[in-house]
Image (tube, grey):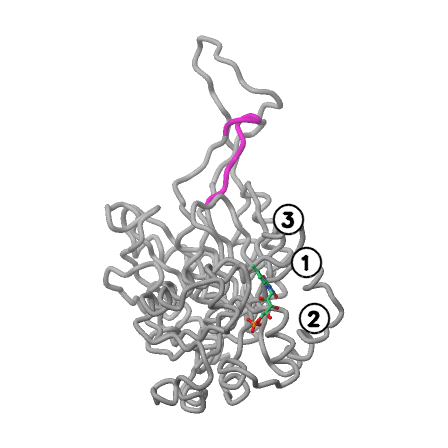
Amino acid sequence: MKKNFSNKEIVLGVTGSIAAYKACELASRLVELGAKVTPALTKSATELVGAASFEGITGRRAVTAMFEPLQNPEVEHIAVAQRADLFLIAPATANFIAKAAHGLADDWLSTTLLATKAPVLFAPAMNTNMYEHPATRENILTLKIRGCTFVGPDAGRLACGTVGPGRLIDPMAILEASAPLLRNQPDLKGKRIVMTSGGTQEPVDPVRYIGNRSSGKMGRAIAMEALARGANVTVIAGHSEAPLPYGALVIPVSTASEMAETAVGLAQECDVFIAAAAVADYRVDAPADTKRKKTGKSLTLTLVENPDVLGLVGAVRQGGQVLAGFAAETDDLIKNAKAKLEKKKLDLIVANEVHSPESGFGTDTTNAAILDRSGHVDKLPLLSKDELAERLLDRVVGLLNRS
Ligand SMILES: Cc1cc2nc3c(=O)[nH]c(=O)nc-3n(C[C@H](O)[C@H](O)[C@H](O)COP(=O)(O)O)c2cc1C
């Protein structure tokens, strides 16, 4: 995802919402991702948040008035409109959305917005009644029809005390929605990816389970990268410490059987299926209905084999689909991964070493190799999970384009 933002020119338009202060965090994350951010505050926004905060975060002058840039050609509105890769209006007030929908140009931000051909993303924030007012609904629809993108708002308790939609969505969701707009060639646009992520949990009784050490970080990285490339992403999510992207449709599951049933139901409709979850091979035969008590004796549990998620998905495989899996191994990495690739008739498998401090469950980096059906083994250097996701999806795109 970082690749999408690196060196991109982004105009961050901050308008007069109570949520304006949250745009500071957004600006900070954009800078962290390598973007060059020009902050532009409407007059109302300057009443609610200081321009100096944005200047400190972005290292650039914040534009706050239409005629002040005459002294500063860097922020002359036509020049900025032309060089922008993205206009991000966050938070976007009802007033600003209305102005944009009607092509008004009565301040720097609205004028520059009218002069740009860059993609535009609005993150609305307002009182629920304002958001639900037919005028606002129509204005949003008009802008959507014109090609603008909207993210949020969230629902919840608003500053005015109302409970309902209108709260500025989390900055992370705004970044996720921005990413595909910044990619010159969103090479997974229109493709549907179904994937599994996290770890399964097999009940022993109502309070205990047999689980594994999967953190869900790899699955999150893949989902984020796929979204950044424009894919429509569904995550069948087992237990995960890492939060899943807002932009994905997340279907929570607990056991391997639930994961298998959900995967088979969705696999036929997708272009790509990626199995990144750590799935329990066995489950407790007869989990107790009530909490097991200590008996003073040892306890024997009978384990029975779980359904094989990838095997079942492979059985309903459609022509042209790409099927990729992971092999988390502690020994004989390549040999074991190769056997799994062949047995499950996968197109790609990521052989993942899970036995060292820098590579394994919960780490941010991983030692891996990508194997394909032709027998080619691409041994990768130590990579972050984000980088591994990028490499994997490069290979997936290659296979989709071939078929
Ligand atoms: C404290 C305060 C909070 C406000 N919060 C919002 C808000 O969240 N959303 C909104 O649409 N308007 C909000 N307004 C009203 C706008 O500031 C007002 O409509 C203004 O004209 C917007 O100007 P702008 O769109 O040029 O920034 C708020 C006003 C005040 C005084």
Query: Does 84 lie within the magenta span?
Result: no
- Which residue is labeled 1 in the image? 128
Chain-order first, disc 3 or disc 2: 2
Amino acid bearing label 3: Gly
Q: CA distance from mark 1 to mark 3?
A: 10 Å
Disc sitting over residue 136 in the figure: 2
Q: Can see residue 390?
A: no
Quadrant assignment for ligand 1: bottom right
State whether residue 20 is above or below residue 109. Answer: above
Q: Farthest residue toward the top?
A: 296
Task: Check contact, mark 1 vs mark 2: CB within 8 A.
Answer: no
Measured as percent of width and height from the top left, residue 359 is found at: 28, 51
Q: Ligand 1 closer than 8 Å to the CB at disc 2?
A: no
Disc 2 is placed on an element classified as helix
Q: Farthest residue toward the right?
A: 134
Q: What's the magenta region?
A: 199-208
Q: CA distance from mark 1 to mark 2?
A: 11 Å
Query: Between 68 and 144, which is closer to the camera in this rendering?
Result: 68
Residue 83 lies left or right of residue 302; in this view the side is left
Query: Between 290 and 65, which is closer to the camera in this rendering?
Result: 65
User: In the image, which is nearer the foreground, mark 3 or mark 2?
Assistant: 3
> Which of the 4 image quarters holds residue 179?
bottom left
Disc 3 is placed on an element classified as loop
Disc sitting over residue 161 in the figure: 3
Amino acid bearing label 1: Thr
> Which of the 4 image quarters holds residue 337?
bottom left
Measured as percent of width and height from the top left, residue 280 is found at: 47, 41
Q: Can see residue 10?
A: yes
Q: Ligand 1 closer than 8 Å to the CB at disc 1?
A: no
State whether residue 181 is above or below residue 217. Answer: below
Query: Between 208 and 116, which is closer to the camera in this rendering?
Result: 116
**Local crowd size for mark 3, using a 10 Å CA cut-off: few (<14), some (14–19), many (≥20):** few
